[in-house]
Image: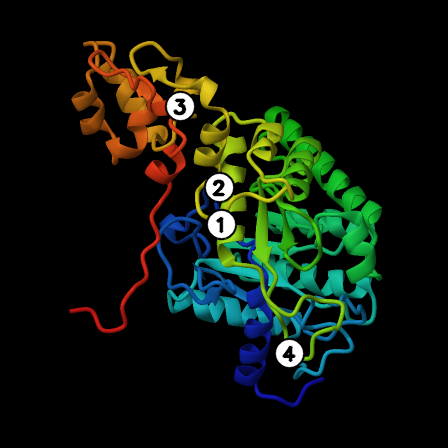
Amino acid sequence: MSKNSILERLAILADAAKYDASCASSGTAKRNSLGGKGIGSTEGMGICHAYAPDGRCISLLKILLTNHCIFDCHYCINRKSSNVRRARFTPQEVADLTISFYRRNYIEGLFLSSGIVKSADRTMEQLIESARILREDHDFRGYIHLKTIPEADAELVHRAGFYADRVSINVELPTDRGLTRLAPDKNARQIEGAMGRTRADILDARDARTRFKYAPRFAPAGQSTQMIVGADQASDADIVNRANRLYGKFGLRRVYYSAFSPIPDSSAVLPLKRPPLVREHRLYQSDWLIRFYGYRASEVVAATDSHGNLPLDMDPKLAWALKFRETFPLDVNRAPREMLYRVPGLGVTAVNRIVAARRHKSLRLEDVARLTVSIAKVRPFICAADWRPTRLIDRGDLRSLVAPRHEQMELFPA
C-alpha cells in the first residue's frame, strides 16, 4: 500500500487517467434525486475536473484505481517497465472521494479505470466493489463509467454492467498487427469476445425491461471503445473501416480516437513525434458523417489520399465533394434531405431549415444565404431558383476557392 497521502495519490492517479478520452456521458438513463431520495443526478451541471490530453474538459472525476500494472504495453505510461510514481486507491477510498466531490458540486459522476494489478480478475473485482459501494451503500444515482478488463472472467464483466451506466473495453489499436506488436499481453480476439458478450447482455436487459418493469438495468448508456491514433502505421482508412465494423458488430455508442501522446522513457518502437491533433479531429468528423449523415464507410475511405489518410487541410465532407463533383450541383428546391446532407457547409440545422422553407416558396440563393452560416462555401455545390453554378463545379481551382485558408498569426499584431 502506498504511503502517499490521499491528495498525493489523487494527483498521481488523476494525471495517469488523462490519456483516456472515452468518458463522455451522453445517452445514459435519466436519474434524479428529487424528493430527497438518494443523492446525485445525471442531470444538471458540474465542475469539470478531468481533461483529455488535448485539453478537452470532462465533468467527471476521472481516475485510476491504481497505476500499477503487470502488462507492458509500449504506448502506455503505466506499463510495468515505466519509471513513474505509483499509487493505489482502495474501493472505499474511490467511493468516498466521489461522494465528497459530488457533494461539493465539483463533478457529475465517476469515470474509473485501472492498471492490472495482481490479476485481471482481482482488478475487476476492485472496480466493481467501488461501484457497488457507491450504488448500494451511498445510494449514488450519478453517472458511473467503468472501464472493464477483457482478460477478466466473463461473469465479473457482466456484474460491472449492473452498477455502471456505461462500460467500455478498449480495442487499443486499429489493427491486430499493431496490437500484437505494441501490446503483447493483449489479444484482439479476447477483446472482441468481451465486447460481444457485453452487447448480448445489453440486448437481454433491454428485452427484459420491456417485459418486466423492475428488471435490473444493465449499462443503459451502452458500451464504447477507444483507439490510439498514430502509434502504429495504420492509415485513416484502416481506422475508419475498423470503427465501422465495431459499430455494426457490437452496437457501440461511440468509438473514441485518441492521438498518440509521447510518454516519458518511451519504448524505442514508438514514433518520436505525436501525430497532428487535427488528424484525430478529422477522424471524429468522418465518424460523424457515418453515424449522422448517412455516409458509408467506403465513401469516407474514398475521400482519403493514396496513402489512405484523410486530408488535414479540409474536412472529410468537403474532400469527398471535391473528389465526386459529378454528384453536384444539387437543387435545394428538389434534392432529398439525405443528399442535401452531402453539401459542404450544410449541417443538420441548415438542411432542416431549407426543407421547411421550400414547402412555402421556391428558394433563391439569397434565401439559402439567410438559412446557412456561409453561402460562399455552399454556392458551388447547389442550384437555386435564380442560381446555377455553370462551370463553377468543374473549375480546376475549385479546391483553392472553397478550402479553408490558413493564415500565419502575428506575435505582435498592429
Query: Which of marks 4 and 1 precedes in the sequence?
Result: 4
Amino acid type, mark 2: Gln
**Gap in angstroms between the C-alphas marked 1 and 2:** 6 Å
Real-space Cα separation, disc 3 to disc 1, in angstroms: 29 Å
Mark 4 secondary-structure assignment: loop
Mark 1–mark 2 CB contact (< 8 Å):
yes
Q: Secondary structure at mark 3?
A: helix
Separation of residues labelled 1 and 4 (CA atoms): 25 Å
Left or right, 54 with respect to 262, comes to left
Q: CA distance from mark 3 to mark 4?
A: 50 Å
Name the residue furthest bottom. Answer: 3
- From the image, which quarter does the C terminus lie in? bottom left
Q: Which residue is disc 2 drawn over?
A: 285
Of marks 3 and 2, which one's residue comes earlier in the chain? 2
Q: Circle 1 sits on which residue?
A: 281
Q: Position of residue 352 (x, y in %)?
A: 31, 23
Q: Quadrant of residue 330?
A: top left
Q: Quadrant of residue 137?
A: bottom right
Query: In this figure, which residue is indicated by the disc labeled 4?
Result: 264
Q: Which mark is residue 102?
A: none
